[in-house]
Image (cartoon, coloured by chain):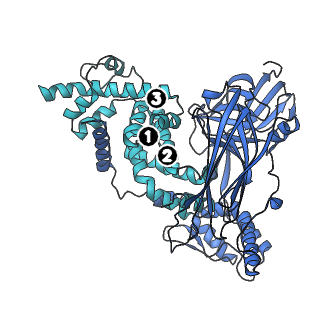
Amino acid sequence: MNEKQFSKILHAIEKERVPEDMDLWNEIKTQVNPMESFLARHRSIYQRRMIILAAVFALVMGTVAVWAQGPEDRKDLPKDQGLQDIEEVGLLIELNETQTQNNISMTLEYVYADVNRISIALASEAEVVPDMQLHYLVDLIDSVGTEYLPTFAGDGISPGPIPQSLHELINYNVPASVMDNETLDLILTIEVSGDDDCLPHSKDCIYEPESLANFRFEFTVKLYQGIKFDVNQTVSDGDFEIEMRDGIITPSATRIVICYGLLDYERLDTVELRVNGEIVTTENTYTFVEFSDTLDENCYFLILTQSLMEAGGEWELTIPYLLSIIFPVPQDVVDYMNENGIPATLTEDGMVKYDNIKPPEGMDIDEFEAIIANQPMPVLIHEGGPWVFKFDVNTNNE
Amino acid sequence: MNLNDPIHCLKNGDISGLETLVKMYQVEAVRAADLITRDIQQAQDIVQSAFIRIYDKIEQFDETRPFKPWFMRIVVNDALKQITRNHQISLETPLDSPNGLTIGDLLMQGDANLDDYIEIVESQAEIWEALGQLNPEQRAVIVLRYYLDFSEEEISESLNSPKGTIKWRLHKARQQLRTILKPLYEGGNG
């Protein structure tokens, strides 16, 4: 018996222990609420529908045979504060290199790299049949084959209901193995695929995308190092301990390692950083990252997406609370919707089902949105806190 | 089947996407978690929680990447966290063995090929018992390597550990299995 047979034994053991027909869905569905998801997205869905309507109108008028988004329509990608900061000091590398294949063009707009992130801005335009939904498979490796994984989300337009165009900022994690490099020789590949025979969600055909174009950009980018600082503080609010380990300040961001060993549903939600008494964080200048090859178990990156290279002095970082979410009872949501004229039912599975995610006939969008806004909402519970960390950061050292 | 579909549904607020993912991956995920926790109820709870987290964090998932490895590494990591929270097992933990050897002692023994022992010890129960004597980290690498068929690089990424550490853990896990199975092997031959 070899290792393959060992693997077979493991499968055989588990086949006996966990039956094939085991089903967790009944448990899971009671703990998620589709309306919560809808609520977060309904504005953008509504806007996308308007865009689709505009596209359909254009087709009906016979003005275009293909959907094409020209460069003149493309707006600049919003840059986070950190990218604006490095752009101001001339560190952002504008490439604007365009490749075209099969009526699809791909532009590598700009790149930037420091040890806290590699930022890459991409834009594409495609002249394809209107219903074709394109998928973009984006991979970043370096010349020795190291794979880079996306980290926190950047602003941009991801493939959506009409993803013939892509305009996106992608932030990648810098693997530990290349952290000390002066430069990175990077290879960005993008495979574009689509199926012009059917829409992905249509029920009467199988969506089988075929590869339509393969782009490859090779470039070398300087890897800016950072200023490291240690915190090594563990603070308790009386119940829970949170540890702050260390951080790195780079031209585009600051990354701080925060660790705690609580349950899964308590998550970091907000922080406030004061430097020499002045608040430097806003709602849009930080994010949290859970997955990285350099993170230990139960640890997270707090990423401050702004330049703090000149912000030496006394730092005070406050985690005011951790966040837990309790979802509303589905029947309460159904009752509320029906009382307010929005048809909703409870499925056999105990889930809220809507006939349409748009205003019923006779109801205007403002009224509809007001009803949605006032529905039974998930209850956000602030747990514990505050945890306050005070430490000195010297930004003059190298 | 295009796996982007349920993800895409989910990202667009369609809960049926989550149901599809649950139906597709729940059994394999629970089995993987059970191999680590050795507790079916706990394994189900872990997988259930993982799916709810997926629902909550689906915006963070890069649709261009395969879902299954991403999800399975979450499940394995959660199982590992859960069991290490419940049972702090170290190399000094005494084994449930009559001679009172510790795992550390056993690691120092062992000389034959693992395959030889497994060839004799065909009983699933014996393998199951042997797995139970590994520590959770070792079980996790065994599950990732031999149950989920991850490469060493994928395991390294999944457990946020350098590849060298993973190679070492796999080596140690194999060595320990070999040592644990040795008496059975000798009994089988004798």
On screen, residue A62 above or below A377:
below
Mark 1 lies on residue: B150
Query: Disc 2 is attached to a residue of which chain?
Result: B
Q: Position of residue B130 (x, y in %)?
A: 29, 32
Q: Residue A38 sits in which quadrant? A: bottom right
Query: Which chain is assigned cyan?
Result: B
Judging from the image, what secondary structure is the residue with disc 2 in? Answer: helix
Residue type highlighted by circle 3: Ile
Q: Which residue is mark 2?
A: B69
Q: Position of residue A367 (x, y in %)?
A: 78, 74
Residue A15 visible? The answer is yes
- B45 to the left or right of A275: left
* Rendered shade, chain A: blue
The mark that comes first in sequence, 2 or 3, is 2
Q: Is residue A297 above or below residue A79?
A: above
- Badge 1 crowding class, 10 Å Cα cut-off, few under 14, some 14 to 19, many 20 or more, is some
User: What separation in Å lies between label 2 and label 3 (alpha carbons)?
Assistant: 17 Å
